[in-house]
Amino acid sequence: MESKTRLTEDAVRPNGNRSLPFGLMRMVKVQMERLGLSGFLDGLKTKGVPLSTVVGVMCVYQLNGGSSMNECGDWVSDPIATEKLCGGKRISNKTIGRALDILSVYFDDVLEVIWNGINRCYDITETNVIIDGSHIPLNGVKSKLSAYGYGNGKVQNQIQFMVAQLRSPPLPFRIETYAGNVSDSEQFAHFLPMVIGYLKKGSVITMDNGGAVREILKDIKDSGMEYVTRVKMNDNDDEWIEESVSEFVCIDGDACGVSHTFKDSDRTVYLFFSADKYFRKVNSAEKKAEKLASIAIENLYTNRKKPRESDFVIRRRNPYAGVDVRVGVQKLLDPFDPEDNMKAVDELIGDRCGYFKLESSFPMDLATALEVYRSRIAVEHLISSIKSVVKLKPLRVWKTASVNGALLLALTAQLLVSLTIVDLKGTEIERNIHGKRVKTISKPSPRTVAESLGQLTVTYLEGGKSNAGVIFSNFDALNSEIMSILDVLETF
């Protein structure tokens, strides 16, 4: 009779085996050395654990799903992690806090090393960039950067940051922190000169309408750079639409547009109509109209003695003054009449639904202008990745130095992943873009790369000696390709 062994809960016993994310550990180490970052960081701290080791451990920890620097110290506290990740030297929470402070002190120097490293790794012939900003909730009120500002659809205690990324290769290289209540235009005015210092003359800066201020745009031109930005529409644009509707040129299956170049300056403005943008706005307006109709029915067609104030009025609290509000409601449209419901939707979407306006400092054809502006999505994905993949979540720090250090650490970790993605060969695929079959190179997202490398583990068996006690597990096609790339990089 054949004997079968079955794994049961009773057969599982605690042991001293320890698995570590080898894929991330190796990627971080190789890419930091490639940029010249390891050698530079080690020169900033001469005692105790080398700074490159501490920064590398924090990058691995964040990319592996960790978000608390306090827990990072615990993560590397056991003997095996201390030996393999930290070179046998213990990394305490105090060491981590000190590392963030050093990164803050040498903030600009580290970014300069990163920029020089990027240019050494790749032949950067064009320095066209994309710029955008975002915010991070902040738990704690003692930071000078802490301030209440608008983010996530509400007013919250936060800090803000701006980041710059090359269009090609898509690599981030500059980040800066701002107080939570600083306006977009103020951030752009401060951040742009920093970025321009890295760029070649004639480089194109692509940004959203936060930077579309005349003084800022003039400074960009005066510095020898060009720009592409979204600008707000005005009454003149409404007249332009009415007069030029027959001149709109179809660009693809989604958009059409018209442009005008001012000959004295070459400044060019573009009006676009996007069917996708139009239908998304109409869909949103229909849902809102349905909600407003139900409110109207409750207040006009029921036995309610008086209208509910909160349905129509938003009170602003002012400790210095009181206000008496009286609400009277009269019917303008019939919520039971389909035609009136359509009128309500039309009023909510407005006359400019589906239209948007761009401006550039030099003339381009409509398709190129739209393509350049749409490239902004790359920096939006970058910001999303910094928050979700690198785990830059609500900060629990008070010191400005710690905030700056945490932001620089997040940029570094993201850059290491971005470098790896750039080096991947990718897969050629055909996509249906606005009714056309287009061949593109598809590469994995930062999340996919981080997860694949995090799953490639090395397990050190309890009591194992030399290589006999080491097991590498969970190879897949992606992390195997990355390991091959790192093999080549380590030979240089």
Image: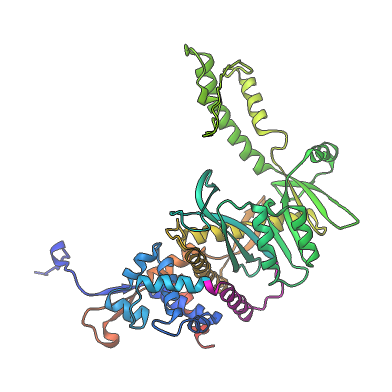
Was residue 48 drawn as part of the magenta stretch in this picture? Answer: no
Quadrant in which the C terminus appears? bottom right
Q: Residue furthest front?
A: 320
- Which residue corresponds to the image point at 47% horizontal and 60% vertical from the top-left? 392
Horizontally, residue 127 falls left or right of residue 397, namely right
Q: Quadrant of residue 342?
A: top right
Front one among 188 and 124: 188
Asked if 303 appears above or below 404 in the picture, the reply is above
Of residues 52 and 165, the one drawn nearer to the viewer in this rendering = 52
What are the residue bounds of the magenta stretch? 105-128
Q: Position of residue 101 (x, y in %)?
A: 47, 71
- For residue 363, above or below residue 61: above
Residue drawn at x 55%, y 22% as measured from the top left: 324
Q: Nearer the viewer, residue 28 or 91?
A: 91
| SS assignment for the magenta stretch, majority | helix
Number of marks: 0
